[in-house]
Amino acid sequence: MGSACIQIVEGNPHLRSLLGWHLQQANYRVYQAAGVYQAREVFLTRQPALIILDTELPDGDGIEFCRWLQQQQQPLILLLSARNTEADIVTGLKAGADDYLTKPFGMQEFLARVEALIRRNRTPLAPAYLDYGELQIDLVQRRVRFQGEFIELTPQEFSLLYVLAQAGGVPLSRSELLRRAWPDAIDNPRTIDTHILSLRKKIEVQPRQPSFIQTVRNVGYRLNLEILSSSATQPAPSELSHQKVAAISRTSQLTVSSHAQKNYPL
């Protein structure tokens, strides 16, 4: 199969390295993480097509992380677990996993399951570039262009802006933004306010009167995609001037022509 991006989240360093080596030999691009904290960061940065996830991690619960992943872009998930009861398997699948492989397992079976999941690939590839008129987001280079110029964003500011754009204009609560955009668990919703203020200073024409990143009372924040997109379709100021001049010119010609016909008949 090959070429797909796969993330391995496994607390055992020996097993993690072994799985990574076999996947690389099969021509997959592999990124590894030892726990939940690192896994969130890798996921937000690399957007893998498949996540191989151990259910027991040193800094968190793999099942809970699986549920968190399902709130994102719904990547394919293969759970690895030493728990082999029917109840454990059902819990994993209901948490959002696409397949469940119990330990110990053979490497050939592991690779076959990975290939089957990649081949199935239930979701289309994420776009590499988002264009909202005055705002363009490059998801590969993680760069943002606003009004024709690149702006410098911190990694966290970029992730926050991307999550807002991904929501398609739907308002997201502070807690939801924390879950989607932050690589680690944070319980302070005011962290969102601080980063929103910083973003507005960089992409708003008037940060004190924001029009792009809007506050939705009693809910949270939304990205106003309508005004961003409409700005790309409206004529530029110079074009508007030419249109007005042409219209005035046509009106003047009609007026002069009408006046001439009244006072100087043929």
Image: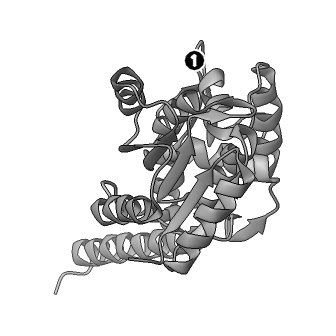
**x then y, percent, for residue 48:** 53, 59
Q: Is any part of residue 178 visible from this angle?
A: yes
* Amino acid type of the residue tagged 1 in the rendering: Val
Q: Residue 193 or 75: which is nearer the viewer?
A: 75
- Tell me which corner region of the image, top left, top right, bottom left or bottom right, holds residue 91: top left
Say if 98 sits above or below 239 in the image: above
Residue 227 position, x and y percent, is 51, 47
| Viewer-proximal residue among 185 and 209 | 185
Q: Residues within 10 Å of mark 1 (few under 14, many from 20)?
A: few
Residue at 53 percent of width and 67 percent of height? 5
Q: Residue at x 63, y 64 (%)?
A: 18
Tell which residue pokes out farthest to the left in this image. 266
- Tag 1, which secondary structure? loop
**How far across and down, in percent of the image, does residue 211 sit?**
63, 39
Tell me if 105 is positioned left or right of 206 in this view: left
x 79%, y 19%: residue: 188
Q: Is residue 244 left or right of residue 210?
A: left
- Residue 136 is left or right of residue 150, and the answer is left
Camera-side residue of 150 and 138 = 138
Q: Quadrant of the C terminus?
A: bottom left
Q: Position of residue 104 (x, y in %)?
A: 50, 46
Residue at mark 1: 219
